[in-house]
Image (cartoon, helix red, strand yellow):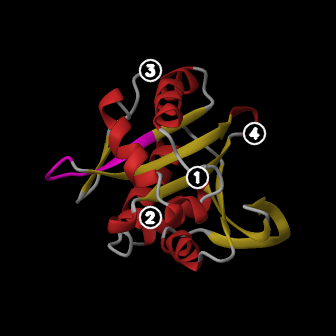
Amino acid sequence: MEMPELHTGRLVLRAYTPADTENLVRLAGTREVAATTLRIPHPYREQDAIEFIAACRPDFDLGRSVRLAITLRQSGEFCGGIGLHLIAEHHRAELGYWLGVAYWSKGYATEAAKEIVRYGFETLNLKRIYASYVSGNPASGRVLEKIGMRYEGLSPSHICKWGVFHDLVYYGILAEDFRATRHSM
């Protein structure tokens, strides 16, 4: 199966390539991005990007994940990343995404998330997609609400990042709710 290339009105979600290394380090490497994500280390080094990019295709082939670069449709400019961590035996996936600081508050995260959720339900035939975010990042919560996910709960002091414990807020959507929402639009 080929890695997907997904198109929206303003974005292309495509496979990462080695040419993305510099932009990945530059954008994901900011403290602001690392502070709002669960799995991006800080500092984020070139070797981190090389290893991440190298793992994307094998993880896709093994059915573990779909991780795509977010680029602007008109210019091809790299602006972030999005993915689904797949749990095949349960027909579910965890959604994760990030954008470089210069691309925040422009609707790109919502647009990319809508498209990868559509792909997850319509192409991968998932039953459920869920996501979590650090409680101090309410912008992520708004993205999840805009794409039709519902609040599912809070895990107090669930992660420790940089020596500080943070609550995680969970959202999710079922395939049937996604379909019902799409048909009512």
Q: Is residue 102 visible?
A: yes
The magenta stretch spans which residues?
68-76
Q: Is residue 177 left or right of residue 53?
A: right
Name the secondary structure under disc 1: loop
Mark 1 crowd level (few <14, some 14–19, many ≥20, 10 Å Cα)? some
Percent position of residue 27, x then y: 40, 54
Name the secondary structure under disc 3: loop
The mark nearer the N terminus, 1 or 4, is 1
Name the secondary structure under disc 2: helix
| Residue ID for mark 3 | 1
Q: Nearer the viewer, mark 4 or mark 2?
A: 4
| Residue type at tag 2 | Arg
Percent position of residue 87, x then y: 70, 37
Seen as rendered, the residue at the extreme left is 74
Q: Nearer the viewer, mark 2 or mark 3?
A: 3
- Looking at the picture, does residue 144 appear above or below residue 18? below
Residue 160 or 123: which is nearer the viewer? 160
Name the secondary structure under disc 4: helix
| Residue type at tag 4 | His
| Residue ID for mark 4 | 90
Check residue 42 in the rendering and tell me which mark sits there, or answer none.
1
Q: Nearer the viewer, mark 1 or mark 4?
A: 1
Q: CA distance from mark 4 to mark 2?
A: 23 Å
Q: Residue at x 52, y 62 (%)?
A: 31
Check residue 159 in the rendering and tell me which mark sits there, or answer none.
none
| Residue type at tag 3 | Met
Q: Nearer the viewer, mark 1 or mark 3?
A: 1
| Residue type at tag 1 | His
